[in-house]
């Protein structure tokens, strides 16, 4: 956040008010506040003096006002910073004034509340059905995606769907709080912890055996007994990119638990791109695991971005065409895409994911409401 924007918010001066006092258009003031872009038709120093006057009258401290437009001599822009700007977007909330401006009761991008809120593009639908089939019929798969790409939503949707359809699938989820792939920065999730999570879900009243051999034999028995009553078993591990290599190798032993030809347990790993590297076929340490694991990647929504935005507004009974212009959708795609992938041919630098898109549009709606714009346009997206 710029010093000017921070000071305006601290003093309770809206950009619309400042525009009126400076006799400038709201977009021109937005350009000054957000990008240090000064109109060529006006004297820059005169405008800065007028802004200082407004801040002083609003009670800003003299030390802050005096040095407001002074450039730091030590600050040098790194060439890569401009390229990485598209990656920087913190969590955004929709202001009450913004809701009133656009006649919205809630933020269209707030958390998914039911399975009807889950957006299903053709790619996401495939992953959704793949994890559902794995949970019900056995298998070993890893779902890989950037933070905010929808992995946790898929997990919640799977669990809710199994309950809604009354499927006989027991879900087992080890706690992963503080999990790291080494014991120096956190705690590793070990085969013992996974065994404890499985037994707690399948046979909670039975005490866990102390010796490793007896414990594994016990685990095999309780899973077999449960399977014979008609249950399937699915182990889901979130943040799986933080699994250690030894634990990943041990997962093969869980997959090998059988009752005749029937597998007793299926495994679904959910993790960030680091997991894909750990499960690389070129990694000799995990080659036996890789041969058994299907890796599915949640890719950016480059092709389905307009449909996703429309879906989010429709679920809160809002008409997206009255709030966001078509050129703004393309501006969102461009802003969340790295320089080398603007063509869409290479998604490696794209962050067109649900979380990033929601944060960007929320910030843009707040800005549009602040400057009195009736819709979010491409120019407003560029100013966020």
Image (spheres, grey):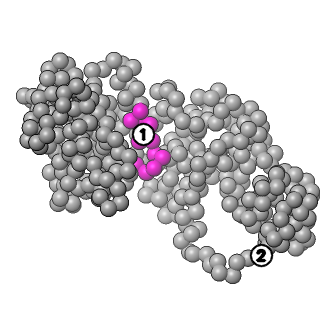
Whole-percent x, y for residue 73 in the image: 69, 82
Whether residue 130 is situated above or below residue 253 in the rendered picture: above
Please tell me in which quadrant of the rendered image residue 64 appears. bottom right
Q: Secondary structure at mark 2?
A: loop
Q: Secondary structure at mark 1?
A: helix
Q: CA distance from mark 2 to mark 1?
A: 45 Å
Residue carrying label 1: 152
Residue carrying label 2: 70
Circles 2 and 1: CB distance less than 8 Å? no
**For the N terminus, which image quadrant?**
bottom right
Q: Is residue 212 magenta?
A: no
How many residues crowd mark 1 within 10 Å: few (<14), some (14–19), many (20+)? some
Whether residue 158 is situated above or below residue 57 in the rendered picture: above
Furthest toward the bottom, the residue is: 73
In depth, the one of 224 and 86 nearer the eye is 224
Please tell me in which quadrant of the rendered image residue 383 appears. bottom right
Give the magenta part as a residue range.
145-156
Q: Residue at x 29, y 59 (%)?
A: 182
């Amino acid at each position: 956040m710029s010093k000017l924007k921070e000071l305006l918010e601290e003093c309770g001066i809206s950009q619309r008010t400042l525009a009126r006092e400076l006799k400038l258009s709201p977009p021109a003031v937005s350009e000054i506040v957000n990008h240090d872009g000064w109109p060529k038709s006006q004297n820059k120093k005169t405008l800065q003096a007028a802004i200082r006057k407004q801040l002083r009258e609003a009670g800003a401290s003299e030390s802050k006002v005096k040095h407001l437009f002074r450039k730091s001599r030590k600050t040098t822009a790194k060439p890569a910073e401009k390229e990485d700007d598209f990656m920087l977007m913190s969590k955004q909330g929709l202001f009450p004034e913004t809701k009133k401006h656009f006649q919205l009761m809630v933020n269209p991008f707030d958390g998914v509340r039911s399975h009807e809120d889950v957006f299903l593009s053709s790619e996401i639908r495939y992953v959704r059905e793949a994890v559902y089939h794995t949970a019900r019929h056995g298998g070993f798969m890893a779902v890989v995606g950037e933070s905010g790409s929808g992995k946790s939503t898929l997990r919640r949707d799977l669990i809710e769907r199994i309950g809604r359809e009354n499927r006989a699938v027991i879900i087992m989820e080890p706690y992963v709080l503080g999990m790291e792939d080494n014991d120096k920065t956190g705690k590793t999730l070990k085969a013992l912890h996974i065994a404890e999570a499985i037994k707690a879900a399948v046979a909670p009243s039975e005490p866990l055996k102390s010796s490793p051999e007896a414990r594994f034999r016990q685990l095999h028995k309780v899973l077999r007994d449960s399977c014979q009553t008609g249950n399937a078993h699915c182990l889901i591990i979130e943040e799986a990119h933080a699994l250690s290599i030894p634990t990943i190798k041990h997962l093969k032993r869980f997959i090998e638990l059988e009752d005749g030809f029937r597998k007793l347990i299926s495994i679904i790993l959910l993790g960030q791109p680091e997991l894909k590297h750990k499960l690389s076929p070129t990694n000799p340490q995990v080659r036996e695991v890789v041969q058994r694991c299907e890796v599915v990647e949640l890719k950016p929504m480059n092709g389905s971005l307009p449909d996703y935005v429309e879906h989010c507004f429709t679920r809160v009974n809002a008409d997206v065409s009255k709030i966001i212009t078509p050129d703004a959708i393309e501006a969102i795609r461009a802003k969340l895409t790295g320089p080398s992938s603007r063509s869409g041919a290479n998604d490696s630098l794209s962050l067109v994911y649900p979380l990033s898109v929601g944060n960007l549009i929320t910030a843009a709606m707040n800005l549009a409401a602040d400057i009195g714009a009736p819709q979010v346009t491409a120019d407003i997206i560029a100013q966020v």
